[in-house]
Amino acid sequence: MAYSFELGPIRPPSEAYSLLIRATMNCPWNRCKFCHIYKGKKFQLRSLEEIKQDIKTAKVIQDEIKELSWKSGYGGRVKEIAGKVFSNPPNQAAHNVALWLYAGGESAFLQDSNTLIMRTNELAEVIRFLKETFPSIKRITSYARSKTAAKKKPEELTELHQVGLSRLHIGLESGYDRLLQYMDKGVTAAGHIAGGRRVVESGISLCEYVVLGLGGREMWREHATQTAKVLSEINPDFIRVRTLTINNKMPLYNEIENGDFIRATDEEILEEERLLIEHLDCHSNYVSDHITNLLQEIEGKLPEDKEKMLAAIDRFQALTPEERTNFRIGRRVGIYSQLDDLYDLHRREMVERLVQRLSQGNEVDEKTIHALMERFI
Ligand code: SF4
């Protein structure tokens, strides 16, 4: 169990229980102002041998967990032993394999930020080898950039789908050209549409990520309407939102400090989200599963759940100012997960005490709330 393999820093929330295999390292673009994940780190392709060796090591760890299960009288059932290993793991790799086995061992995620940049035949070989090594795996997903997806030939994406690439996660962030340029995303709205449509047409499931609040106070309207327009043209299977959260490792931090970019408040971001949802004309699943989002209950299948999703925003806006502050703080410290939690007296009193401590007789300021959010990234 002392064996280990490479692990990258992030994966989508929906891949929390996936086996993580680091197919490439860091980000080949690495310039987006709102992103700190790979700053200061050089992008690297990994050789097929290195990636396969990591997959083999994951198999060794899996086999050890299975053996332990036999030795401990669980008859080869891995769940009990996997649970013990991930609560007290010898290293991160063993933690990942144990958690994956505990959850059923059915999905894998290829890290890092743009695995699609690999040569198609090599990526296909990694996917084939992963499936041969772990026949239990039914779903393999990865991150990609729109620009890279647009550069792949349609037949290359179809091949990847046929060998077993189930889904690509793309950071759309915004569909507004001026904002994409300001944030140095390295792609235009047209580029997003070209890349996204190419993935959809190949049969690979597509998840597009949007950053709520990315337009700040100046560009929020265009950010919402243009993003909705681009998403409606792509019609991805999933639209996932997360809320702009800043730390001092991001280039955007300095622009905020010097007053060039003014952040929107939670309440302004909800107005932006309302506009986004109103303008969406697609058949996607809208998912709000990120801890940074104020209202995680804004979820549903478009277009049929649109009214229900907008009603969640109405519900928040109908609260008194004190209740809204209480909810914002409770949410940002992880005490609340949805609006109904506001009516749990015990939790509400806990948050009330916290609000009093943070406000010291005044209103809780935005900086305090932003500092609480920073802990999530
Ligand atoms: S947002 Fe994605 S493309 Fe941009 S720097 Fe971060 S990882 Fe790279």
Image (cartoon, grey):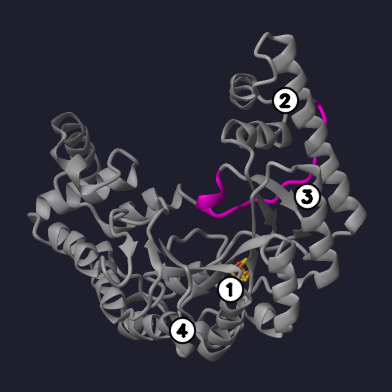
Residue toward you, 139 or 258: 139
* Distance (Cα) linking label 2 and label 3: 24 Å
Q: Secondary structure at mark 3?
A: helix
* Distance (Cα) linking label 2 and label 4: 44 Å
User: Which circle marks residue 179 in the picture?
Assistant: 4
Query: Circle 2 is placed at which residue position?
Result: 90
Query: In the figure, residue 98 lies in which quadrant?
Result: top right
Q: Nearer the viewer, mark 3 or mark 4?
A: 3
Query: Circle 3 is placed at which residue position?
Result: 130
Res 20 visible? yes
Q: Does ligand 1 reach within 8 Å of label 1's beta carbon?
A: yes
| Image quadrant containing the N terminus | top right
Q: Does ligand 1 reach within 8 Å of label 2's beta carbon?
A: no
Disc 1 marks a residue whose amino acid type is Cys
Q: Which residues are magenta?
A: 2-16
Query: Circle 1 is placed at which residue position?
Result: 32
